[in-house]
């Protein structure tokens, strides 16, 4: 699996390939495991090799989704902490069983200056995260919550079906369960969805 990571990032430097094999380690995690906790120092950079991770912040008993991490991705906020030696401002929890590549932070900093391909990886990670956050901000600022909810359902649907509770949707959209339930009923009355037992079907 480490070889897949090396190939995916197009790491051509032989020395970096050897350092990755010698100085990193791989762990596996089940759904619900925390791999990053708020207000803790980042000691290793965690890169998803397989699976899915949800990165979020907590504010007054409400969770605010930042983004999901998929294969070959890492948390930008944690990457930034590696360079600044500061505490994490987010939580990261396993959504789907994961295989994680762990790299001690001192190597993350050193490799950024030593190896072009690693510098490209970190630069691309920052750029892609910036673009994602700008898009997310635009949606929050200009798109009504009802429309954001429907777009989110469409993006999460498998064969037009979404298997998420009202509480999960509220958590991931940064609102309350009551608000989500009300908006779902409105979407159903407009013929866009059908509410079922622990699932939502997209109709339109």
Image (cartoon, grey):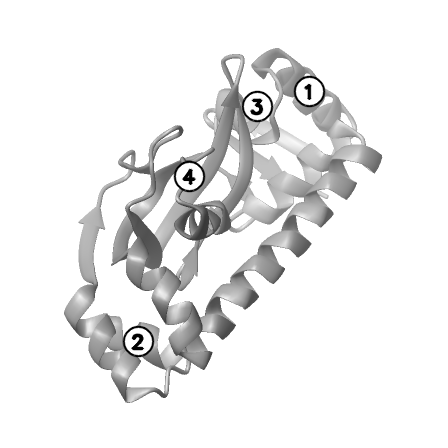
Is 5 placed left or right of 135 in the picture? left
Q: Residue furthest left?
A: 22
* Real-space Cα separation, disc 1 to disc 2, in angstroms: 45 Å
Instruction: Point out the tag, 3 or 1, that comes first from the N-terminus.
Output: 3
Q: Nearer the viewer, mark 1 or mark 2?
A: 2
In the image, 150 versus 3, the foreground residue is 3
In the image, 120 versus 181, the foreground residue is 120
- Element under disc 4: loop
Q: Quadrant of residue 148?
A: top right
Q: Which mark is residue 185?
A: 1
Q: Nearer the viewer, mark 3 or mark 2?
A: 2
Is 126 placed left or right of 47 in the picture? right
- Element under disc 3: helix
CA neighbours of label 4 inside 10 A, class few (<14), some (14 to 19), many (20+): some
Q: Position of residue 37 (x, y in %)?
A: 35, 32
In the image, 192 versus 21, the foreground residue is 21
For the point 30% across and 76% down, the residue is 4
Instruction: Point out the tag, 3 or 4, that comes first from the N-terminus.
Output: 4
CA neighbours of label 1 inside 10 A, class few (<14), some (14 to 19), many (20+): some
Q: Are marks 4 and 2 in contact (CB under 8 Å)?
A: no
For the point 21% across and 80% down, the residue is 18
Q: Position of residue 76 (x, y in %)?
A: 49, 51
Can residue 129 be seen in the rendering of this structure?
yes
Instruction: Point out the tag, 3 or 2, that comes first from the N-terminus.
Output: 2
Q: Which mark is residue 86?
A: 4
* Real-space Cα separation, disc 3 to disc 2, in angstroms: 36 Å
Q: Which residue is mark 2?
A: 4
Can residue 203 be seen in the rendering of this structure?
no
């Amino acid at each position: 699996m480490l070889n897949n990571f090396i190939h995916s990032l197009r790491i051509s430097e032989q020395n970096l390939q050897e350092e990755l094999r010698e100085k990193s380690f791989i762990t596996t995690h089940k759904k619900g495991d925390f791999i990053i906790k708020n207000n803790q120092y980042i000691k290793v950079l965690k890169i998803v090799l397989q699976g899915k991770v949800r990165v979020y912040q907590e504010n007054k008993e409400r969770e605010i989704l930042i983004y999901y991490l998929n294969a070959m991705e890492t948390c930008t906020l944690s990457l930034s902490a590696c360079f600044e030696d500061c505490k994490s401002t987010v939580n990261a929890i396993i959504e789907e069983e994961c295989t994680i590549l762990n790299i001690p932070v001192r190597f993350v900093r050193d490799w950024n200056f030593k190896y072009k391909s690693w510098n490209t990886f970190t630069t691309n990670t920052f750029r892609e995260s910036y673009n994602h956050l700008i898009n997310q901000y635009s949606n929050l600022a200009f798109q009504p919550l009802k429309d954001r909810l429907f777009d989110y359902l469409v993006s999460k649907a498998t064969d037009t079906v979404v298997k998420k509770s009202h509480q999960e949707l509220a958590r991931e959209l940064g609102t309350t369960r009551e608000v989500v339930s009300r908006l779902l009923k409105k979407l159903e009355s407009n013929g866009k969805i059908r509410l079922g037992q622990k699932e939502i079907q997209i109709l339109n």
